[in-house]
Amino acid sequence: MWGKRDDMIVHTFEPYNAEPPRGALARRDITTVDTFYSRNHAPVPSIQTAGWAPRVDGMVERLATFSLEDLRSRFPQYTEVATLQCDGNRRVGPIEVADIPGEAPWGPGATATARWTGVRLADVLREVGVDPDATDVAFVGADVSIDPDVGEQFGGSIPVRKASEREVLLAWSMNDEPLSAVHGAPVRVVVPGYIGARSVKWLERITVQDRPSENFFQQSTYRLYPPEVDPTEMGPGDGIALGLVAVNSEVLSPDDGAEVAVGPVEVTGYAFAGGDRTVVRVDVSVDEGVTWHQAELAEQISQWSWRHWRTTVDTVAGPNTVLARAWDSSAALQPESPAHVWNPKGYADNSWARIRVHARVP
Ligand SMILES: Nc1nc2c(c(=O)[nH]1)N[C@H]1C(S)=C(S)[C@@H](COP(=O)(O)O)O[C@H]1N2
Ligand SMILES: [Mo]
């Protein structure tokens, strides 16, 4: 379905929400398109590229529309390797702490990295002329939520300052192939370092304005509420708007619950730091965090990408727990447990990675 591998873990078919098993992400800097998770709030819209031309409006000197051909021919083309991470990534952790009704139990697979090609949003904004009093750039996609409580197109915004950075793209290509329908064709936004929700797919409209987007998906979802509140009683603008991604990591191999041979076992995983931070260290423990040792970090392939890591741990016969925790370039460290980060919608679980393996004596 949607060009994805057969072993995707499908949370819902319509809208399509699916992630690969963790092992499928292991050891590869770039995630193949068939393995890249997909997160959708509405049915995938069918868009004819001919006739499609997103419009730029709001606090600009010149209203404009740009077809795919306009974007390709009028602006220089750039490629960025960037990781996308959904804020529901790893929600399965907080769900184990206390139930989170109505939210899918995403594992660690709602994180993936691609090579995105397109034009810089900054170049497009320069072309239309941004009012100096503008503070935010809002995006709207073509997909309309089927939830009667929502009933609007997907959208969200980022600060003008971020929108003017070179890494933010209007992309038509993923891993050197044309963007597929489920990933936002003809053109999507890619906002490296920000929660996946801001990388709006099926881009239809860009509005320069003096406040954050009023869209449901900016004001009423992707908000961090305090643990004691009932999320159904929250209104637009309540809680903290999620934006920059916090440092996070996961074990990718062996699989959680795997059987391994007793003795040395190779452990691999990813670590990711949002904003313009990078991963600088990953620690691994097999004694519940009493002692740690540093994993070997793979090269940072782009400022905006995850970093893979590997190490060898010594397992003892029977059950073993493997923990991992990453540090970023601001010296931020992952918090210990999902209980520490629990919030009523289960967003932003960046607690220590924890898997169990069973070591067998041959
Ligand atoms: N138009 C539109 N854009 C969207 C979404 C959506 O539902 N509609 N989902 C967002 C969310 S929450 C995430 S995490 C990413 C997922 O991108 P992907 O499906 O290409 O992996 O797209 C974002 N952009
Ligand atoms: Mo997301």
Image: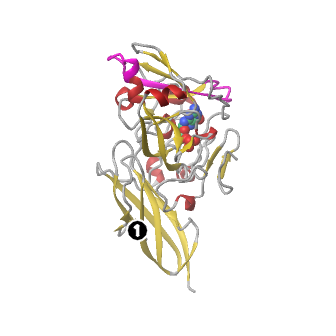
Q: Name the residue under label 1.
A: 285
The magenta segment: 126-152
Check disc 1 and give the amino acid type: Ser
Depth check: give the residue in front, 51 or 150: 51
Percent of width and height locating residue 255: 56, 65
Report the front residue among 76 and 280.
Answer: 76
The crowding category of the residue bearing disc 1, from other C-alpha atoms within 10 Å (few below 14, some 14 to 19, many at least 20), is some
Quadrant where the C terminus lies? Answer: bottom right
Looking at the image, the residue that sits furthest to the bottom is: 362
**Residue 227 visible in image:** no
Residue at point 35%, 70% (across, down): 291
Q: In which quarter of the image is residue 204?
A: top right
Residue situated furthest front in the rendering: 73
Q: Is residue 144 located in the magenta-colored stretch of the structure? A: yes
* Residue 222 higher or lower than 265, as above or below: above
Q: Where is residue 90 in the image (x, y as percent from the top left)?
A: 52, 51
Side of 167 relative to 68 (left or right): left
